[in-house]
Image: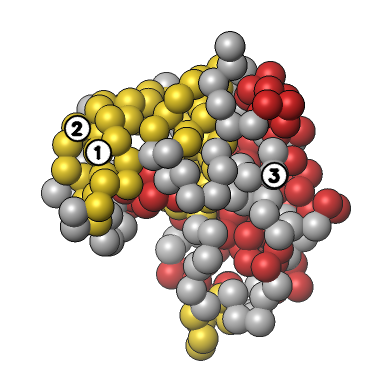
Amino acid sequence: MLDVDHMTVAIGDAILLADISLTVPAGETHVLLGPNGSGKSTFLSAIMGLEPFELTAGTIRFRGIDLAGLGVSERAQHGIGMAFQRPPSIEGVSVAEFAAAVGGADRLAHGAELLDLEAFVDRDVAVGFSGGEIKRWEVLKLFLQKPDFFLFDEPESGVDMEHISAVGMAINELVAEPGPDGAKRGALLITHTGLILDYVNADQAHIMNGGRIIHSGPPKELFAHIQASGYVAPG
């Protein structure tokens, strides 16, 4: 579904990611683990086409479509959606109005209940939300948009323990529900704390360090290795 082949990403002359290859098949959720500053968020941003990150080598293909040269809106129209770590607030636009604008009004009640955000539907988007509430809102946003492939940038960071399970269950439901044409969805998720792994049905994990993917393996086994030995390849 997502095929990144020997990708290098830079800002000007500074190379941030080097020679990265990663494939996420349809129906799977993959997890990206790594220390702060290792390039995880840059990787998601490059897939989404966010500035100022520039693809200088390799390819990013989504369902066989080469994303090079496509802007953020075009990538979204092809079916990629992202839950941001630090999204903007939108004053004057309520959550309910946002849901209607993206064609997700019929999904708002269920998503808000699942993420314990029923009291927020009449509030302006992310205005005055706490850090954890913003993260839950970003997952709800994807419930409303219903993309085919989800990028989650640390969805549990700042979320209280009571709601991490809700975030995980919501992510599972998003990925498990087939698209309108019956096609499977997929996801790539960054986690820093690893707590979300207790609730998300993850299929594969990858360690990123120094702007490179250095190892891949079963998510919980790989996280246990990181807890014991740090962000290094096993063996």
Residue 20 percent coordinates (x, y): 32, 30
The reply to whether discs 1 and 2 touch (Cβ–Cβ < 8 Å) is yes
Whichever of callouts 1 and 2 sits on the residue coming sooner in the sequence is 1
Residue placed at 27% from the left, 61% from the top? Answer: 51
What amino acid is found at the position of numbered circle 3 in the picture? Thr
How far is disc 1 from disc 2 in space, using C-alphas? Answer: 6 Å
Q: Which residue is mark 1?
A: 8
Label 1: element kind: strand
Q: Quadrant of the N terminus?
A: top left
What amino acid is found at the position of numbered circle 2 in the picture? Gly
Residue placed at 32% from the left, 41% from the top? Answer: 17
What amino acid is found at the position of numbered circle 1 in the picture? Thr
Whichever of callouts 1 and 3 sits on the residue coming sooner in the sequence is 1
Answer few, some or many: residues within 10 Å of disc 3's Cα (few below 14, many 20 plus, some between 14 and 19).
Answer: some
Q: Foreground: 168 or 117?
A: 168
Q: Which residue is mark 3?
A: 193
Q: Which residue is mark 2?
A: 58
**Does 233 sit left or right of 201 as displayed?**
left
Label 2: element kind: strand
The reply to whether discs 3 and 2 touch (Cβ–Cβ < 8 Å) is no
The reply to whether residue 74 is visible in this rendering is no
Label 3: element kind: loop
Whichever of callouts 3 and 2 sits on the residue coming sooner in the sequence is 2
How far is disc 3 from disc 2 in space, using C-alphas? Answer: 30 Å
**Does 126 sit left or right of 27 as displayed?**
right
Answer few, some or many: residues within 10 Å of disc 2's Cα (few below 14, many 20 plus, some between 14 and 19).
Answer: some
Q: Foreground: 214 or 152?
A: 214
